Amino acid sequence: MVVKIELEVRMAVKIVRVLNTNAVVSSDQEGRELIRAGIGFKKKKGENLDEALADKTYYLESVDDSRRLQEVVKEISEEYLEIVSRIVKTAREEGLKVRDSLYVTLTDHINSAVDRYRENIALKNMMKLEIRKFYPKEYEIGLRAVQWIQEQNDENLGEDEAAFIAMHIVSAELGSGSNVDVNKITKLINAVLQIVRIHFKIEFNEKSISYERFLTHLKFFATRVFDNTIYQDSMQEIYKVLIEENEYAYSGVRKIVEYIEKQYSYKLTIDERLYLLIHIKRILDEQSE
């Protein structure tokens, strides 16, 4: 987690390395490396550091992520790191469990997006409608991020870029970011929703809590399919009982199971089937009401 470090007692702190003219790295009493922004001008390694001069202080729990972020800050302006810090803070306040790797990937991405904008290069996000539909919280944060960038640089990157930012947020929720293909995950989610919609001849209430919970489940379920990760939660004891009591809802689960096995060669465990059953039952119950 990146945090602003506030020290009640100031102690002599030495600079470990200088990243650029505005950012340096120092270590705290426990030997953890901290990135301090707004302080690097004419600073040298080994010099004492007046912590009061730092505009922002960042700490990442992962040493690897911290070093990767330092490399990013070396090459680009750390001004985008402050925007990403706001994005991460907002995402976590919205209940999204994003990994620290987002600081690295998104800071670099926003820098590249601004550079492209200044060169009049506009990238269309072909998944924008799906991202807005299936990841509404992430997309809304993406829109806020675009607004924050415009307030800082007077450059409006637009809704396509908001969707790209949302995709980075989703990746940080689902994995380390390097092995997560949000496009594939989104297409699988769409396919499962289509199966449920057609099989039960229903239209989803996209503003309902049941639908939102189902989407959240599908997001992580799809990740397990592509990672070929088997989910086990020892639910076998109630599996048969729930199937017998909810045969109609389970008929939709069977359709999904057949599709996943045929399309992705992934065999759903009892636990995976049970969770799908629970979510589908909630949606059907909501429809009947």
Image (tube, helix red, strand yellow):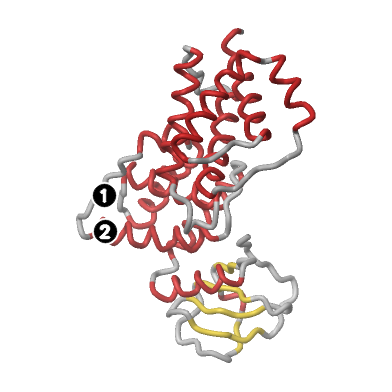
**Image marks 1 and 2: residues in contact by CB distance under 8 Å:** yes
The residue carrying mark 1 is: 123
Q: Which one is in front, 113 or 80?
A: 113
Instruction: Say which of marks 1 and 2 sits in front.
Output: 1
Q: Residue at x 73, y 40 (%)?
A: 233
The residue carrying mark 2 is: 116
Residue 11's image quarter?
Answer: bottom right
Q: Residue reaching furthest top?
A: 289
Q: Residue reaching furthest left?
A: 120
- Looking at the rendered image, the quarter that the C terminus falls into is top right
**On screen, residue 249 above or below 68:** above
Whole-percent x, y for residue 85 in the image = 53, 57
**On screen, residue 170 above or below 60:** above
Whole-percent x, y for residue 257 in the image = 54, 30
**Which residue type does callout 1 highlight?**
Leu
**On screen, residue 57 above or below 11:** above
Q: How many numbered marks, from 0 up? A: 2
Whole-percent x, y for residue 166 in the image = 44, 45
Q: Residue at x 51, y 61 (%)?
A: 103
Cα gap from disc 1 to disc 2, whole angstroms: 9 Å
Q: Residues within 10 Å of mark 1 (few under 14, many from 20)?
A: few
Q: Is residue 142 left or right of residue 250?
A: left
Looking at the image, tell me whether mark 1 or mark 2 is earlier in sequence order. Answer: 2
